[in-house]
Amino acid sequence: MDSVKILIKNNIRIIASNVTDVCQKAIEYQETLPFTSLILAKAISVFAPLSFILSAKEGKVTSFIKSDGAIKNLIVESKNDGSIRALIGNPNIETEKDDSDFENTPLILGIGNEGILRITRTSGTHTFGGEVKLVKSDLITDLAYYFEVSEQIFTAIRSTVKFENKNKIQRANSIIFQLLPNHQEDDIVWIENFIKNNDLETTNLQDYINKMEANLLSEKPIFWKCEFDRNKVISVLQDVVKKEKNDLFENDEKIEIECHFCKEKFYFSREEIS
Ligand SMILES: [Zn+2]
């Protein structure tokens, strides 16, 4: 089962995520080609745990990338109850390696050189966040840079996504190391040495965690869930009708709206919108 573990080692907070099932659902709903599946799964592995790191008791964290690359954009939304949904602007990015070694293709080839990472927290009616330029388009450096600039927190991140075959994810894991306010030089050295001596790519997540000899503070389940907010869509449609003054329905009896996350179709009648 997918979960996020929060651990403490001296003055370091460690967030260890297994999001294999969430990523599998995401690539099925988004109908991604193999290299696009890799980008989406890597993004989920690093951004999904943010609701447990950044947010208050209730609320959600939205990680948004917009770039000049083939992906166009990418969204990972994570809520405090552990629910995740995600989408990628272009699910059809092909590489020559799509049938073989696609899982080792550098993400920058899909994400592009120029772009932004915006992270927004929503708690009740409160929304706030920050934005940075993409520095390496590998997601892990970009998120670490975000934490450095926006939160002044030193962060080191590792992520791995492996496939059984081009349609089936074998594992999607990430580890986020963050220095706590009272950290010492020793803590930095420990993170650097641990990362140098232990490779997440070749070690299973639990073995990797065991090697840290850290204290487990909590473990939270994490899962795919897409909630379509019908009332919100109705109010948006009502606004459009008011402003545009044209008939959205034309000759149809209902409007079809597709959810960009789960691709489910929803229908709205003339009576609902007026
Ligand atoms: Zn949906």
Image: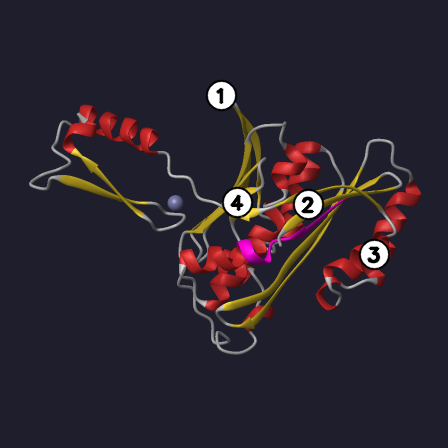
Does dot 3 land on a helix, a strand or a loop? helix
**In front of the other: label 1 or label 4?**
4
Q: Which mark is residue 262?
A: none
Quickly name the residue at label 4: 84
Residue at position x 88%, y 51% in the image: 213
Q: How many marks?
A: 4
Q: Is residue 20 magenta?
A: yes
Quarter the N terminus occupies: bottom right
Quickly name the residue at label 2: 144
Quickly name the residue at label 3: 210
Quickly name the residue at label 1: 125
Q: Which residues are magenta?
A: 14-22
Residue at position x 43%, y 69% in the image: 94
Does dot 1 land on a helix, a strand or a loop? loop
Going by the picture, which residue comes out furthest to the left? 251
Task: Count neighbours of disc 1 (C-alpha within 10 A) and say few if under 14, some if 14 to 19, many if 20 or more.
Answer: few
Q: CA distance from mark 1 to mark 3?
A: 40 Å
Query: Which one is nearer the viewer's eye here, 187 or 138?
Result: 187
Callout 1 amino acid: Thr
Callout 3 amino acid: Asn
Q: CA distance from mark 4 to mark 3?
A: 26 Å
- Residue 147 position by quadrant: top right
**In front of the other: label 2 or label 1?**
1
Residue at position x 42%, y 39% in the image: 227
**In front of the other: label 2 or label 3?**
3
- Above or below, 213 against 152 in this view is below
Callout 2 amino acid: Ala
**In front of the other: label 1 or label 3?**
3
Callout 4 amino acid: Ile
